[in-house]
Amino acid sequence: MFAYRIDRRSGVATYVQIVQQTKQALRLGLLDVGDQLPTAREVVAATAINPNTVLKAYRELEREGLVEARRGLGTFVRRALGRADHNGLRGDLAEWAARARAEGLEREDALALVTAVLEEHFPQGREGDAQ
């Protein structure tokens, strides 16, 4: 089952972390159309956050058309996002990450490189960009 990890030190609002992690799970194929998200009660038990925070995140996902709440049943994935493993790109990236680590890069250094390259090839605000 899919589980959320909340980083209280990140400076990112908790409900935003839930939204972002749900979208990432959709992109990576960890969640698919028809899958049920953890109930608010399950998320609260696992993360010790306020249930209203979970509900706020789920409402945002519903507003974006990604999930739908079914009264008495839970919240279910309604729409998938593009898969992140197009033609083996995830494997290529994993190999690159292993090479970067072997060459002594710290996680933050590798992340900075990836972010810089993404900014070059996927500038913010370009038509067709979506979160």
Image (cartoon, rainbow, N blue to C red):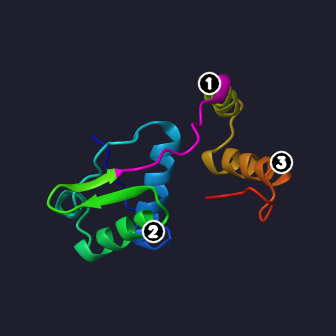
Amino acid type of the residue that numbered disc 2 sits on in the rendered structure: Arg
In depth, the one of 54 and 95 nearer the eye is 54
Amino acid type of the residue that numbered disc 1 sits on in the rendered structure: Gly
Choose mark 2 or mark 3, whichever is in front: 2
Q: Is residue 109 above or below residue 75?
A: above
Point out which mark residue 63 bears. 2
What's the distance in space between the residues labelled 1 and 3, CA to CA?
19 Å
* Magenta span of residues: 77-88
How far across and how far down the image is residue 6, in percent? 37, 61
What's the distance in space between the residues labelled 2 and 3, CA to CA?
29 Å
Q: Secondary structure at mark 3?
A: helix
Q: Is residue 88 above or below residue 31?
A: above
In depth, the one of 107 and 104 nearer the eye is 107
Upstream in the sequence, badge 2 or badge 1?
A: 2
What's the distance in space between the residues labelled 2 and 1, CA to CA?
33 Å
Point out which mark residue 121 bears. 3
- The residue that appears at 29% across and 61% down in the rendered structure is 69
Amino acid type of the residue that numbered disc 3 sits on in the rendered structure: His
The answer to which quarter of the image holds residue 129 is bottom right
- The residue that appears at 50% across and 38% down in the rendered structure is 28
How far across and how far down the image is residue 78, in percent? 40, 50
Choose mark 2 or mark 1, whichever is in front: 2
Label 3: how many residues lie within 10 Å, few (<14), some (14-19) or many (20+)?
Answer: few
Q: Secondary structure at mark 2?
A: helix
The residue to which callout 1 is attached is 91
Magenta-span inclusion, residue 41 = no
